[in-house]
Amino acid sequence: MGAAAPAPVVAAQPTAQQDAAYQPAAMAPQAGFNVNQAAAGALQGAIGGTQQAMNAPLQVGAYFNPYQQEVIDRTQQDIERQRQMAMNTLGAQATAARAFGGSRQGVAEGVLAGEYGRMAGDIAAQQRQMGYTQAMDAAMRDRAARAGYAGQLGGLGRQAFQTGQAITQAQERQGLMQQALQQSLIDAARQQFAGYSAAPQASLAAPLAALGQAPSQSTTTQSAQPGLLSYLQTMAMLPKLCWVAREVYGEDDPRWMEFRDWLVGHSPDWFFNAYDKYGAKFAKVVRKVPALKYIIRPFMDAKRKAIGYK
């Protein structure tokens, strides 16, 4: 009697839900292009792809050869055919020896069937082991490829971030250049306007100098006598003697002009000369250090009130 062929074993195939869970999440398409959003999306995709590649179950069944069972069945059929041919040969030999149907024939057939059955089982096990090894290797290589793709996506995200940083720095430099250009235009316009507004007063400087009304260089304290020449002298000094006072009070505050009246008509000569020599430079210091205004303003207020201003 011939031994029955081993039943074929069908490899488990992964379900659609399991295969879908193993896939990295795809980034949603965006309208337009923003390098910062692209960098963030690529980073998220790289993290998700790496987690899926490392933590998702390894679906080895998805990588089995779909024709493996057919190969095993074909091999089993060949072995069974060889067994039947051997059984026929054994029966013919028993007939020739006039021992057909005897106990020795039965023992020989049993041994023969056992050997062929063991051969069929070993070959089927080897084929299945080979198929599993190949499927495992394919699954591991696919996992490594997914991790590599996630790394590439992370690199693209880093490149997008660096591109965004470069664009931002270029925009900052462009903004600073435009600001500097606009500031230079404003300064030039202010200087030109100051020249226009100071032209009438500057034209009186030469006649006043010819009349001897320029400030004295002595160190004695004198008080100017109000008169026409004093007022003309005050008008001539409009474009000059107003640096510090304008910084302290502001150009729109008339109190800086009241302090200028005290400076031109009532201040000591040494103070007038020092103010005329260092006033412009000291005004720049006050502009850079606004806290100095609160120290200088009480002095200027006292001098304004000393000549009758409130």
Image (cartoon, grey):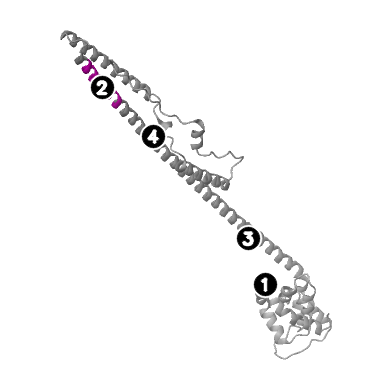
Gap between marks 2 and 4 measured at Cα:
36 Å
Gap between marks 3 and 1 measured at Cα:
19 Å
If you read the primary sequence from the N terminus, does the residue marked by circle 4 or circle 1 appear first? 4
Amino acid, disc 1: Arg
Look at the picture and state if 92 lies above or below 298.
above
Furthest residue in direction left, as rendered:
97
Task: Return the mark for residue 52.
Answer: none
Count of marks, rendered view = 4
Q: Quadrant of the N terminus?
A: top left
Q: Is residue 221 visible?
A: yes
* Callout 2 touching callout 1 (CB < 8 Å): no
Q: Which residue is mark 4?
A: 138
| Element under disc 2 | helix
195 or 72, which is in the foreground?
72
Q: Which residues are magenta?
A: 106-122
Task: Return the mark for residue 114.
Answer: 2
